[in-house]
Image: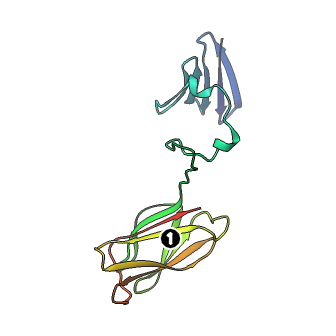
Amino acid sequence: MSITLNADTSSGLVMTSDTSGEIKLQSAGADIATVDSSGITMASGKTLPAAALTGTVPSSSVDALSTASGSAPSYSARAWVNFDGTGTVAIQDSGNVSSITDTGTGQYTINFTTAMPDANYATNITIGGGNAYIGTIQSVSTGSVAMYSWTTASAFVDRPIVAVTVFR
């Protein structure tokens, strides 16, 4: 027996059956996922093996990373950004960063898409261009972190490569 559940745009939920032994989830007639004895296959062709669907996940593992090993907990970055801080600030790539505010030469505020639960997070700043440049935190809040980019001679400076990561 097989069941196809289709969230049809004109008829609402439509359920049909056949003898293929699969459960299909569809939206407007297009396959989204198929469940069979081998596991769950998404429409893009990626499969979650059936073995991954057995057993229970301990509540202590819910926040664990799949690549973590050992007994110490592993925490992923809650926000990160790589940007060009020269001229008009340009984000090269990011995660959970909505924008960057240029507040002056070598001074930036990184704004989060989703706020942190509190301001007790760790921030790492890397300024590209060698060891003559330093990044420091000016202030932190749940919605953003303000930072400075400066030289070892204590002068604020814009740099073409600035990378910031936030861990919480």
As displayed, is residue 25 above or below residue 117? above
The quadrant in which residue 27 appears is: top right
As displayed, is residue 162 above or below residue 45? below
Residue 155 at x, y = what percent? Answer: 36, 90
Residue ranking furthest to the left: 130
As displayed, is residue 116 above or below residue 38? below
Residue ranking furthest to the front: 71
Question: Looking at the image, which is closer to me, 87 or 161?
Answer: 161
The quadrant in which residue 85 appears is: bottom left
The N terminus: image quadrant: top right
The C terminus: image quadrant: bottom right
Which residue type does callout 1 highlight?
Ser
As displayed, is residue 105 above or below residue 112? below
**Left or right of residue 4: residue 85:** left
Q: Counting other residues with Cα less than 10 Å from the Cα at mark 1, is it few (<14), some (14-19), or many (20 or more)? A: some
Question: Looking at the image, which is closer to me, 62 or 39?
Answer: 62
Q: Check the image and tell me how it is coloured.
A: rainbow
Residue 79 at x, y = what percent? Answer: 52, 62
**Left or right of residue 108: residue 9:** right
Residue at 63% across, 69% down: 120
Label 1 sits on a secondary structure element that is strand
Question: Looking at the image, which is closer to me, 110 or 45?
Answer: 110
Residue at image mark 1:
99
Residue 160 at x, y = what percent? Answer: 32, 74
Residue at 54% across, 61% down: 96
Residue at 58% across, 50% down: 73
Residue 71 at x, y = what percent? Answer: 57, 45
